[in-house]
Amino acid sequence: MKKIQISPSILSADFSQLGNEIKRLENAGADMIHVDVMDGHFVPNLTIGPPVIEALKKNSSIPFDVHLMISPVHKYIESYAKAGADIITIHPEATDNLEKSINKIKQLKKKVGISLNPETKIEVINKFLDKLNLILIMSVNPGFGGQKFMPQVLEKVEKLDRIKKDRRLNFDIEIDGGIDFENSKLAIKSGVNILVSGTTIFKNNNGDIKKNIDLLRSV
Ligand code: DX5
Ligand code: ZN
């Protein structure tokens, strides 16, 4: 059983204090930082790009789990790798050659993740599972923090976990969107080992992010 890791989403952080917010998360025991990159095209929202990631990475010592909600994504992969992304997660719908994009991320010596929207089936990535370090199961439609968790995606997590065990693969299963102190337990039981959370970590218990991270991690 893999150790449960917490990857706080900075989408819910105070964007005027992002450097300090990342330090706070590190000191509060975050295992990595979930950076939601949005381009206003793949999703109807726009956040940050490589220059901001590069500046933030300089002051951080934990991995950057970069979730690219951008399309077309292939031509931008290198700039996120150079900016300091440690894990680069892309959506299959955002590239016209998924294998080429996966190989590009691996060539850049970064961990490669694929993110499946609630409607996207595992079959889309079946033949690449042995190349992946991480599969990110979206439990909301991507674009915004603070949305309602979609419990139907847990079936997809269970199916993915069965495939992983049957084929003796070792990828991480990460879930992202509407995660709270109750559904996090269901997600872990279904096979998730990395929890992404923005709202629950930053907004609960008067913003006590260490308490919220510890609560999420406690199974
Ligand atoms: C949505 C993002 C999620 C989101 C999670 O597109 O990918 O990471 O920020 O935020 P909460 O935990 O607030 O749902
Ligand atoms: Zn995300």
Image (cartoon, rainbow, N blue to C red):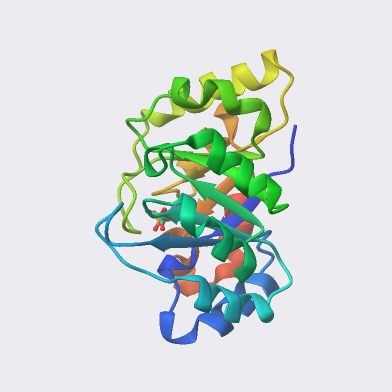
Which percent across, then down, holds residue 169? 71, 25
Q: Quadrant of the N terminus?
A: top right
User: Is 205 on the left or on the right of 57, as rendered?
Assistant: left
| 136 in relation to 154, above or below | below
Residue at (54%, 56%) from the top-left corner? Answer: 77
Residue 33 visible: no
User: Is 196 on the left or on the right of 40, as rendered?
Assistant: right
Q: Quadrant of the C terminus?
A: top right
Q: Nearer the viewer, residue 76 or 193?
A: 76
Residue at (54%, 43%) from the top-left corner? Answer: 101
| 215 in relation to 25, above or below | above
Residue at (69%, 65%) from the top-left corner? Answer: 29
Q: Nearer the viewer, residue 103 or 31?
A: 103
Q: Ligand 1 is in which quadrant of the figure?
A: bottom left
Residue found at the far left of this picture = 44
Residue at (60%, 65%) from the top-left corner? Answer: 211
| 99 in relation to 54, above or below | above
User: Is 112 on the left or on the right of 169, as rendered?
Assistant: left
Which percent across, then down, holds residue 100? 55, 39
Which percent across, then down, holds residue 215? 59, 55
Residue 126 visible: yes
